[in-house]
Image (cartoon, rainbow, N blue to C red):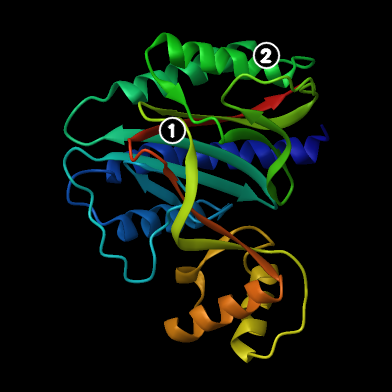
Amino acid sequence: MEKEVLEKYEKARKVSDEILPFAKSLVKEGASILEVAERIENKIKELGAKPAFPINISINEVAAHYTPDINDQTLIKSGDLVKVDIGVQVDGYIWDRAFSISIGQENQLIKASEKALEEAIKVVKPGIKVFEISEIIEDTVTSLGFNTIKNLSGHGLERFNQHAFPSIPNSKNTIKAEIKDQVIAIEVFVTDGSGYVKESSPTLIYKFKQNKPVRMYEARKILEMAKSEFDFLPFTKRWIKGIPPLKIDMALRQLLEVDSIVDFPVLREISGKKVAQSEETLIVE
C-alpha cells in the first residue's frame, strides 16, 4: 500500500479512536438518537475528517440502516439494545466500526458478537480464505448458544466504496476468495432469533448511482450534493439543507424512479428478536 494512502487510513483510524469513546458516552437512557447522531457526525468533522455514511443507530430488532430522520423523536429506553455503526473517511479512505450497548442490563448477545469478532481478527492474514473467517465467526457464536445473521456480512473497503469485494458472511460458506493486501471490515451480527433480516420501512439512507435527467430542480440539486458534498458515499435526508422536507421526499422518489440513486431500507430481524453488532476495520498486509 502506498505511503500516502496508508497515512490517510491512519488518520481515519485515529479520528475513529477518538470518536468511539465519545459515542459510547452519549448512548444512555433518555438520550435523543437524533442528538447522538448529529453530535458524533459533528465531532468527526471537528477532528478533520468526514462521516463515511450517516451514523447508524439501530435499536433492538433493527439490525442496520437506521439513521435518525429529520425531527426524529426517538429516545433511548431502559432495556434497549443499541447498535452504533460509525464510518470515518479521509479523502475517501474509510475506517468502519460498530459497537453495541444494552441499556440498564447486561446482554449476552453483545458478548457473543464481541467474542466472535475477536476470534476472527486473530486469524486474518494475507492468504486466508473468506470461508475460513466465516466458519470461525459462526462456530464462536453458536458455541455460545446464539445465531449469526446469515444474510449480513463483513466487507472490503476501498476508496469511496464502503462495501467493496470481498463479502465476508457471518455464516459458513464455500467462498474461496483470498484476503490479500487490502482493507477489510469484519462485521458480526448476533441474535437469539431466526438469524435473518428483511428490508422494512422507513428508508432513510441513499447513495448516488448515476447521472440521469430529472424534472425537479430539487432533485437535480440533491444529485449534485450527492456528488460534491457527500463524495458519492451514502447520505441521509437530514443532511440535505435548503430544501423543505416535503420537496426532499418528492425529489428522492423521482431520483429513485430514474435510477439515479439507490436506497438502503432499514433491516429488521424477521422474528422480531434483538440483534447485537460488533465491527472493526483491519489493514491486511
Picture coordinates of residue 271 (x, y %)? Answer: 37, 38
Q: Is residue 126 visible?
A: yes
Q: Is residue 244 visible?
A: no
Point 37% across, 14% down: residue: 145
Asked which secondary structure carries label 1, the reply is strand
| Image quadrant in which the N terminus is located | top right
Mark 2 or 1 closer to N-term? 2
Label 2 crowd bin: few (<14), some (14–19), many (20+), radius 10 Å: some
Asked which secondary structure carries label 2, the reply is helix
- In the picture of the structure, the residue carrying the numbered disc 1 is 277
Total marks in image: 2
Which amino acid, by three-letter code, is at mark 2?
A: Glu
Which amino acid, by three-letter code, is at mark 1?
A: Gln
Picture coordinates of residue 79 (x, y %)? Answer: 19, 37
Left or right, 39 with respect to 251, comes to left
Picture coordinates of residue 262 (x, y %)? Answer: 64, 62
Q: Which mark is residue 132?
A: 2
- Between 180 and 10, the one lying in front of the other is 180
- Between 275 and 77, the one lying in front of the other is 275
Q: Toward which corner of the image does residue 127 lie, by quadrant?
A: top right
